[in-house]
Amino acid sequence: MTTTDKIQAFYRAMLEGLGPQGWWPAETPFEVVVGAVLTQNTNWTNVERAIANLKREGLLEARALEAIDAERLGEVIRPAGYFRLKARRLKNVIHLLTGRFGGDLDALFALSTDSLRETVLGVSGIGPETADSIVLYAAERPVFVVDAYTARILYRHGLVDSDAGYDDLQSLMAGCLPDDVALLKEYHALLVAVGKRYCKKRMPACAGCPLEPFLEDGQPVEEEA
């Protein structure tokens, strides 16, 4: 089985075993953008609480976030953790949106995929995973979002080296998958589900994992430090 065949077979096996994940849970593309910033280094339950606070305060729109004081914004999003840092990063995104695009998310998303990704990556505090989450889930452009689960699963199945970087992993997945936004969303979400339930950082639970049949005979599944 080639690498492409295996990666495509992973998708079918995970979808059959786990079902559609329905990710990203948001009412609007703007909410996805905000959630992508807030979800850095925390779990989604905490992000949901922070977003609920923003909605209750009438802050889930660009002009309101532009106007609010950063310290006050930090208090509103406190449940997401690292709230002062995330308030600054969220402000940075909003400054881009209001300063260059008149607060119009559609104007930002009218950029080509490469230009959009480069523009979002140019915002202080926004790394590749956050940028690609915005590009894929909010702008509906075909990019593959790489995270720690992606790296762990591909490494444990012998598809990448332990030192593979973000660009290496993204290039591998992009080369094996079609430019299908719905599929790329679902694949990323399924990898997250497998990583959380089975391919854990410590003491992986391979038994019952949809990807268990793809582990090669004798291939060790080592615990990470």
Image (cartoon, grey):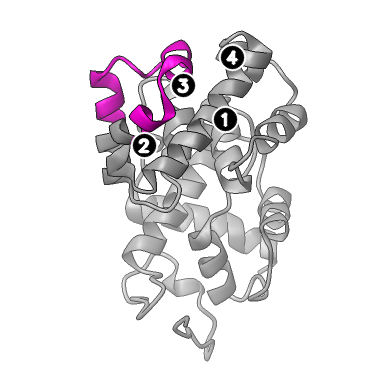
Sequence-first disc among 4 and 2: 2
Residue labelled with disc 1? 92
- Mark 1 falls on what kind of element? helix
Judge depth for marks 3 and 1 and give the one in front. Answer: 1
- Mark 4 falls on what kind of element? helix
The residues bearing labels 4 and 1 have C-alpha atoms spaced at a distance of: 10 Å
Residue labelled with disc 3? 30
Residue labelled with disc 4? 98
Sequence-first disc among 2 and 1: 2
The residues bearing labels 4 and 2 have C-alpha atoms spaced at a distance of: 30 Å
* Stretch in magenta: 51-74
Quarter-of-image position of residue 68: top left
Q: Could you say which is closer to the camera, residue 177 or residue 39?
A: 39
Are discs 2 and 1 less than 8 Å apart at CB? no
The residues bearing labels 3 and 1 have C-alpha atoms spaced at a distance of: 15 Å
Name the amino acid type tagged 1: Asn
Sequence-first disc among 4 and 3: 3
Q: Could you say which is closer to the camera, residue 125 or residue 16?
A: 125
Q: Dot 1, how many residues are within 10 Å of its Cα: few (below 14), some (14-19), or many (20+)?
A: some
Are discs 4 and 1 less than 8 Å apart at CB? no
What residue is drawn where x is 47% and y is 81%? Answer: 224
What residue is drawn where x is 37% and y is 55%? Answer: 193
The residues bearing labels 4 and 3 have C-alpha atoms spaced at a distance of: 13 Å
Judge depth for marks 4 and 3 and give the one in front. Answer: 4
